[in-house]
Amino acid sequence: ALREEVAAQIKKPISKHEAWLAEESSGHMVNRFAEVVAANIHHTLERLDTQRFDEVGGLLADTRRHVYVAGGRITRSNSDYLFNHLQIIRPGVTHLSASVNVWPQYLLDMGKRSVLIIFDIRRYERDLARLATIARDRGALIILFTDQWGSPIGKVADHTVNAMVEVPSSWDSTIAINLIVEALIAEVQNRRWDAANAARRTDQ
């Protein structure tokens, strides 16, 4: 069972494609894909720790903290989506460059008031793991978005959000991850709105 779990974590795209082809299937690809994605979302929400979700929402809404966002080769689109929304909602948000060579300059700015959000799904990226470890050593809080097996970054993460990613494709789906991301964006927006209204009432 352990061998099968490890094999699933590092499965290559061509292996995933062959595995799906080997299974009997019927119906159009769009319908098959949608059914699996819907199941992924359902199981992801079943396992979601809502208290952790609230804690993460509170951290991201706290403008005293600087938020850094990073993603991997596949998950960079998820990190980019989160960054684009957070920078509108609140100040102090940085999207780390895709170039690993410039990460040290971001790490120099990280400290105890920093939050680093990392997206990492199989096949997990060593550069992201090193980034998380160094940022943690500098006192930053680490929030990890990963798959059902869990990135090694989970060992140093303060909060980990797992989502189901497997679909009938050579590539994994990040739709369930992005569902949580969009819900978090809404949560942060609501918290910021409530804080602004409270400040206005105080001024009056």
Image: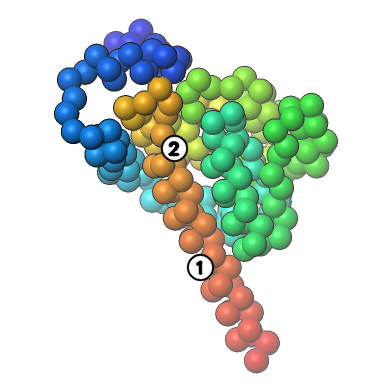
Residue 109 spot, x, y in % from top left: 80, 42
Q: Residue furthest top?
A: 3
Residue 188 spot, x, y in % from top left: 54, 61
| Closer to us: 30 or 110 | 30
Horizontal side of residue 93 vs 6, given as left or right: right
The amino acid marked with disc number 1 is Asn
- Give the mark nearest the N terminus, 1 or 2: 2
Specify the quadrant that holds the N terminus: top left
- Which residue has dot 1 on it? 190
Q: Is residue 204 above or below residue 183?
A: below
The amino acid marked with disc number 2 is Thr
| Number of the label disc, if any, that sits on residue 103 | none
Residue at (67% x, 49% y) in the render: 67
Report how far apart the C-alphas of labels 1 and 2 lie in the structure. 24 Å
Horizontal side of residue 101 vs 160, given as left or right: right
Q: Secondary structure at mark 1?
A: helix
Specify the quadrant that holds the C terminus: bottom right
Residue at (48% x, 61% y) in the render: 186
Residue at (36% x, 26% y) in the render: 169
Residue 6 position by quadrant? top left
